[in-house]
C-alpha cells in the first residue's frame, strides 16, 4: 500500500426547525410501518419453511439407500434417493491458454486485480453559531482491487484517476462432466463444490514478454515490487481437485445424497415439499449428512428469526420516533423519553415476534405454539413491573 494523501472538506447546513424535523419523522413513520409489516412476513414464513425442511430431511433419512459399489449402476435403485461417497473425476483438464495454466478440477477461477486509487472518508458533525457543520476527511490509498473503482465519484479525482476498465477479465471455468464413480453430477451438485484453493505458479514460465511471474501471481507491470496505478496481477484458484498432485495432495472426496436417474444424480422431490440435492466434502455416513442439514436448517431459522425481530424493533422505533421529536427541545425529558421508547420497542417487538412464531407453529405443533404464545406475555409483564405502583390515597 502506498501513495497516501488526504484533505478536509467542511460544509455548513442550517439547523432544521421543528416543522422540518417533524416532516422527516413523518416520512420515517412510513418506512417504519413497511419494515414492521415485513417483519411479520419474515417470521411467519420462516417457521413454515423450517418445519417443511425438517419434515423433508426426516423423510429423506427414512428412504435413503446407501450405494456400496459406485462403479456399477444398479437399476433397482433408479428414481430412489441414494447416498454415496467417492472421489471426483473430470473428463479433461481445465485450461487457460492466455497464461498456460492447466489443472484437472471441477472449477478453475482466474482472479484479476488492478492497482487503483481508493477513497476513504470519515465525517463528524458539530454545531457552531447555531449552524450544523459537517467536517469530512478524505484520504486516498493505492490498493489491489478485483473490481474497477470509479474515480469519478471521488471528492477530488485530480491526482487519483483510475482506468475505466481492466484489460484482462476475471472468469471461472467449470468442467462439463463431473463424476463420482460411474455417476454424473447434476449442475446443482457441481455448484456446491466451492472449496477454492490458490494454485502454485512456481513451476510455470512467464507466458508473454510483458507479463512477469512473481510468487503465485502473474503481473502486468514493469516492476511488480513497485506497481503503478493501472497495473494488473493475476492469480488462479481451483475447486474440486480430480487428479492427484502428489502423494500428499489427493483428489477431493465428496458425499452425495440425491436421486438416482440411471447414471445421473439429480434433485429428489420429497412428499413434504423440499428438494434434496446434497453434497459435502469428505466421506460421511447418511446419518452424518442429514445431521449437518438439520444443523444448517437450525442456523438459518435462528438467523431469520433474529432478522425478523430486528425488523420489528426498527419498525416500532421509527413509528414512535415522532414522540421523541415532540419533546426534543427539553434535554432531560428527551433523554428519558428516548430510553422509554427503546424499552417499549424492545418489549413489544419481542412479544409480537414470539406471538407470530407461535401462529406459524399452530397447525403443526399446537403444544409448542401455545407455550410460545405464553412466553410472548413475559416481556409485557416485565415492562409492567417497571412501572411504579400508584400511591395509596
Image (tube, grey):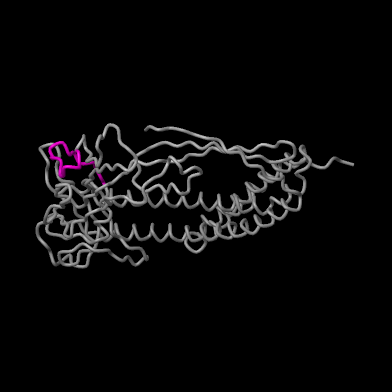
Pick whichever, 2 or 32, lies toward us.
2
Q: Quadrant of the C terminus?
A: top right
Q: Main secondary structure of the magenta part?
A: loop
Q: Position of residue 38 (x, y in %)?
A: 55, 59
Residue range of the region highlighted in magenta in the rendering: 195-212
Q: Position of residue 288 (x, y in %)?
A: 28, 48
Q: Quadrant of the N terminus?
A: top left
Q: Which image quadrant is residue 275 in?
A: bottom left
Tell whether 19 sits left or right of 366.
right
Total numbered badges shown on the rendered structure: 0
Q: Which image quadrant is residue 259 in?
A: bottom left
Pick whichever, 285 or 310, lies toward us.
310
Tell whether 18 sits left or right of 172.
right
Q: Position of residue 292 (x, y in %)?
A: 32, 48
Tell whether 15 sits left or right of 125.
right
Pick whichever, 253 or 111, lies toward us.
111
Q: Is residue 357 above or below residue 160?
A: below
Residue at 23% across, 39% down: 217
Q: Is residue 389 magenta?
A: no
Residue farthest along the front direction in this orientation: 158
Residue at 20% across, 59% down: 185
Residue at 25% across, 43% down: 234
Amino acid at each position: 500500500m502506498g501513495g497516501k494523501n488526504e484533505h478536509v472538506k467542511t460544509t455548513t447546513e442550517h439547523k432544521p426547525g421543528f416543522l422540518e424535523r417533524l416532516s422527516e419523522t413523518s416520512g420515517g413513520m412510513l418506512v417504519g410501518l413497511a419494515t414492521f409489516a415485513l417483519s411479520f412476513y419474515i417470521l411467519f414464513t420462516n417457521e413454515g419453511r423450517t418445519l417443511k425442511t425438517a419434515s423433508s430431511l426426516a423423510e429423506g433419512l427414512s428412504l435413503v439407500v446407501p450405494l456400496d459399489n459406485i462403479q456399477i449402476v444398479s437399476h433397482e435403485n433408479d428414481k430412489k434417493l441414494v447416498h454415496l461417497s467417492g472421489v471426483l473425476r473430470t473428463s479433461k483438464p481445465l485450461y487457460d491458454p492466455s497464461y498456460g495454466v492447466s489443472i484437472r478440477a471441477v472449477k478453475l477461477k482466474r482472479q484479476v486485480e488492478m492497482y487503483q486509487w481508493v477513497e476513504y472518508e470519515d465525517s463528524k458533525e458539530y454545531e457552531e453559531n447555531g449552524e450544523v457543520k459537517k467536517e469530512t476527511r478524505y484520504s486516498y490509498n493505492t490498493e489491489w482491487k478485483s473490481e474497477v473503482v470509479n474515480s469519478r465519484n471521488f471528492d477530488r479525482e485530480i491526482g487519483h484517476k483510475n482506468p475505466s476498465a481492466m484489460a484482462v477479465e476475471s472468469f471461472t471455468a467449470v468442467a462439463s462432466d463431473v463424476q463420482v464413480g460411474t455417476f454424473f453430477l447434476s449442475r446443482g451438485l457441481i455448484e456446491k463444490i466451492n472449496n477454492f484453493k490458490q494454485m502454485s505458479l512456481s513451476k510455470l514460465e512467464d507466458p508473454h514478454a510483458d507479463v512477469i511471474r512473481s510468487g503465485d501471481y502473474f503481473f502486468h507491470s514493469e516492476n511488480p515490487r513497485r506497481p503503478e496505478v493501472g497495473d494488473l496481477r493475476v492469480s488462479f484458484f481451483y475447486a474440486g481437485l480430480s487428479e492427484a498432485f502428489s502423494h500428499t495432495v489427493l483428489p477431493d472426496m465428496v458425499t452425495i445424497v440425491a436421486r438416482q436417474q440411471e447414471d445421473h444424480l439429480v434433485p429428489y422431490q420429497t412428499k413434504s415439499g423440499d428438494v434434496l440435492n446434497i453434497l459435502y466434502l469428505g466421506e460421511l455416513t447418511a446419518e452424518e449428512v442429514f445431521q449437518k442439514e438439520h444443523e444448517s436448517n437450525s442456523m438459518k431459522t435462528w438467523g431469520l428469526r433474529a432478522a425478523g425481530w430486528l425488523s420489528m424493533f426498527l419498525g416500532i422505533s421509527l413509528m414512535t420516533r415522532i414522540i421523541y421529536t415532540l419533546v426534543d427541545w427539553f434535554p432531560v425529558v428527551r433523554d428519558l423519553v428516548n430510553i422509554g421508547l427503546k424499552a417499549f420497542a424492545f418489549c413489544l417487538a419481542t412479544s409480537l415476534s414470539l406471538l407470530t412464531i407461535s401462529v406459524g407453529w399452530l397447525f403443526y405443533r399446537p403444544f409448542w405454539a401455545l407455550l410460545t404464545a405464553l412466553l410472548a406475555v413475559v416481556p409485557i409483564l416485565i415492562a409492567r413491573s417497571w412501572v411504579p405502583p400508584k400511591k395509596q390515597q
